[in-house]
Amino acid sequence: MALFVIERGSTLPAARAWDLLTDWRRHGRVAPLTAVRVRSGPPGGGLGTVFVARTRIGRLGFDDPMEVTEWRPPGTDTPGACRLDKRGRVFTGWALVEVLPLATGCRVRWTEDLGLRGLPRAADPVTRRVAAAVFGRAVDRLLVADGE
């Protein structure tokens, strides 16, 4: 498993950053070659939501199903946390998205432990670097509110 952490500061209020980061369909617009569909869960997301990120290059593709197993939106002065557990045949692991309110905006921390089935542990350093770059770019793009 390749554990990595992405941290970003944002001038967005914590609640707005949370909404942007937990809009699962929106992830498909920022992740390369990926579309996201929400399969089940409460309206507006939340605990128990199941969604699938489908990554495809031409005719080759795979599904990355995930379930929201922790859901605690941020308050005005309390941090929020959302945990995603990967349930797929290709990717394993989990992600923890945290949004910490600040006096002027917020701090986002995305921690992920990512595994690829069949890949030896010796590949973890490369997986970690590539995943951190890809997810870091996605987080940067997610934190840009539409129209800003």
Image (cartoon, rainbow, N blue to C red):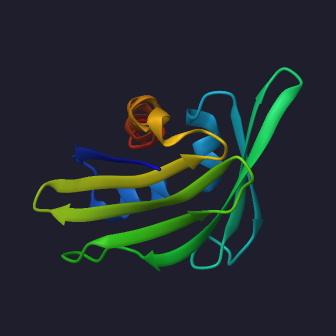
Using residue 78 as the reference point, say whether residue 119 is left or right of it: right
Q: Point out the residue furthest to the right here.
A: 59
Quadrant position of residue 23: bottom right
Name the residue nearer the viewer: 131 or 118.
118
Q: Residue at x 78, y 40 (%)?
A: 62
Residue 51, position as x, y percentages in the image: 70, 60
Q: Quadrant of the C terminus?
A: top left
Name the residue nearer the viewer: 141 or 109.
109
Q: Residue at x 41, y 41 (%)?
A: 139
Using residue 52 as the reference point, say whether residue 29 is left or right of it: left
Q: Is residue 14 visible?
A: yes
Name the residue nearer the viewer: 107 or 64.
64
Residue 1, position as x, y percentages in the image: 47, 50
Residue 25, position as x, y percentages in the image: 66, 50
Q: Residue at x 22, y 56 (%)?
A: 106
Name the residue nearer the viewer: 65 or 144.
65
Q: How many marks?
A: 0
Q: Residue at x 68, y 28 (%)?
A: 33
Quadrant position of residue 30: top right
Q: Point out the residue furthest to the left here.
A: 103
Q: Is residue 45 visible?
A: no
Residue 12, position as x, y percentages in the image: 28, 51
Using residue 94 as the reference point, say whether residue 14 is left or right of it: left
- Residue 69, compared with residue 2, is above or below; it is below
